[in-house]
Image: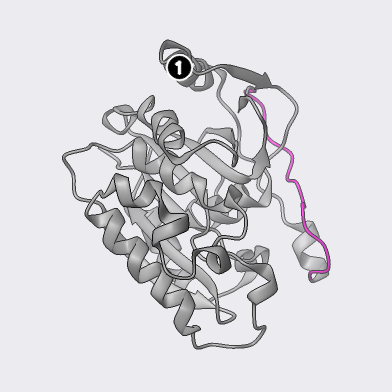
Amino acid sequence: MISPLFICHGAPTLAIENNEYTQYLNELGKALRPQAIVIFTAHWESEVLTLSYRDDSYETIYDFGGFPPEMYSIQYPAKGSTPIASKIEERFNNRGITTKRDVKRGLDHGSWVVLRLLYPDADIPIVQVSVNPFLPIDQQLKIGEALQGLDDEDILVIGSGGTVHNLRAIHWGQDTPESWAMEFDDWLIEKVQQRDVEALTHYQNLAPHAPLAVPRAEHFVPLFNSMGSGKVHQIPKTLHRSYQYGTLSHIVFQF
């Protein structure tokens, strides 16, 4: 069994860095060997839940600007899987969740930065899933709940996003985290580990510094997609926590 994960994908340059977090993700990938991966990515937004449908290799999307030239030469040629996409689409539809198919989209950096650190050989089939940041938290959880049990089939569900993710509050070159960022994550970790869905549903009003930590929800909702896909009787675990640039969180939850 391979339990679902929420992984903060950090800055795109994580793909070429060697630090505490990248080393952790490298080791995590060695410990987990799924048959396929379903990844909710914060960098693919759509009103209707959309799944990547292909069997050939994905193109690598460079959906960022102003980074070192080597970032734009990285390739992550993982293949898709229409059988796995069909399996999870059926699960969504059986729960009354409307879906669409996308046969052209490549892997955005919300997906390939994380996947490249976990599985550098790009040898595991990937199904990419969009997010809708405007849906309430209870619906984000229900989207994840449709995928409960995939872990028993050694299919890894990943939510790729961020907890504290405010690009205007980043301090380039700062190694120590800001206190407000840590206070928000302290609250979040406590509520996640307690599976306090009521509090999490109202995080915008209850969590300290929530408007500063989550100015927009697209990086936050993959947390609830992955959380919903886990077994409700299992206590969520915080596998890793660190920070970069003062406020950018690097947290990994296991559900």
Instruction: Please name the residue that numbered disc 1 is placed on.
Output: 87
Nearest the eye: 157 or 54: 157
Tell me where the magenta segment starts and ends, as one range. Answer: 54-67
- Prevailing SS of the magenta stretch: loop
Q: Residue at x 42, y 55 (%)?
A: 203
- Residue kind at label 1, given as amino acid type: Lys
Which type of secondary structure does the marked residue at label 1 adopt?
A: helix
Q: Position of residue 108 (x, y in %)?
A: 68, 46
Q: Is residue 15 magenta?
A: no
Q: Position of residue 89 (x, y in %)?
A: 50, 17
Q: Residue at x 74, y 39 (%)?
A: 59
Measured along the vertical axis of the image, is residue 222 above or below residue 100?
A: below
- Residue extending furthest left? 233
Q: Is residue 32 visible?
A: yes
Q: Position of residue 60 (x, y in %)?
A: 73, 45
Q: Residue at x 22, y 37 (%)?
A: 232
Q: Is residue 22 visible?
A: no
Q: Quadrant of the N terminus?
A: top left
Measured along the vertical axis of the image, is residue 155 above or below residue 213?
A: above
Q: Residue at x 77, y 52 (%)?
A: 62
Q: Is residue 234 left or right of residue 216?
A: left
Q: Is residue 233 left or right of residue 226?
A: left
Q: Position of residue 49 (x, y in %)?
A: 59, 26
